[in-house]
Amino acid sequence: MDVQRLLHTADRISTWVGKIFAWLIVLLMLVVCIEVFKRYALNAPTAWIYDINNMMYGTLFMMCGAYTLAHDGHVRGDFLYGSMKPRTQATLDLILFIVFFLPGIGALTWAGWDYFNDSLAMREQTFNATPLPVYPFKFVIPVAGVIVMMQGLAEIIRCIVCLRTGAWPERLKDAEEMDVVAQQLAGSTYVDEEARRQAIDNAKRIDEAARQRGAGAGT
């Protein structure tokens, strides 16, 4: 498996997990709406609603972290980043990943596994009239840590590739967009092969410029 396929495989896993757990937004909305109706229309509040809301929101937040990283969606605080050359960007990213990301996510995963084991051993429950088990929710912590760590390692490989080649390897979403462009052009009878390749190259350059401007605009 070449490096680009490896990176896209990591992107696919993170994207797949993020899209699945994103449905918790819909479930969370339904639970809140039902609870508001029960509480104010029927005067029958649910004892465990606050706990289940926190668990669903926490799960959504943690399990979608790798998705955001895979799509380069985290906000950058340095407005100078976008004006840097790709190799300079890769150097900065690589340092930050090694110094902060790897120790931080490693500690989160390790501690999360300990929290889960302790919670499971005591069959930890919430403190309300209708207690809920806590250990399934705490199991999400190490699972999320592993997935984010996987995507972070893919980002480190991206940095290394950029340092070697001077250009960022394309992300999965960029490759899929280029596939759509290629399919649309392939179906046209008014575009020859040379013009088709030129259009795809132009689309890639426009996309790269847009991503650079987006990175520079992050605050």
Image (cartoon, rainbow, N blue to C red):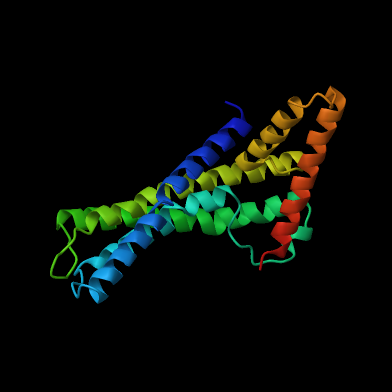
Q: Nearer the viewer, residue 181 or 7?
A: 181
In the rendered image, residue 156, in percent from the top left (x then y), is placed at 59, 46
Up the image or down, 200 lies above or below 67; here it is: above
Q: In the figure, residue 213 lies in which quadrant?
A: bottom right
For the C terminus, give its image quadrant. Answer: bottom right
In the rendered image, residue 144, in percent from the top left (x then y), is placed at 40, 51
Identity of the residue furthest to the front in this view: 41
In the rendered image, residue 187, in percent from the top left (x then y), is placed at 73, 25
- With 136 as the anchor, is 26 left or right in this view? right
Residue drawn at point x = 47 percent, y = 41 percent: 16
The mark total stands at 0
Residue drawn at point x = 57 percent, y = 54 percent: 97
Residue drawn at point x = 43 percent, y = 59 percent: 61
Up the image or down, 6 lies above or below 127; here it is: above
Task: Answer whether residue 53 is visible to the viewer in this image.
Answer: no
Q: Nearer the viewer, residue 50 or 140?
A: 50
Task: Answer whether residue 210 is visible to the viewer in this image.
Answer: yes
In the rendered image, residue 53, in percent from the top left (x then y), is placed at 31, 64
Up the image or down, 140 lies above or below 34; here it is: above
- With 140 as the anchor, is 124 left or right in this view? left
- With 103 as the anchor, is 5 left or right in this view? right
Up the image or down, 106 lies above or below 1; here it is: below
Residue drawn at point x = 14 percent, y = 65 percent: 130
Q: Nearer the viewer, residue 196 or 218?
A: 196
For the N terminus, give its image quadrant. Answer: top right
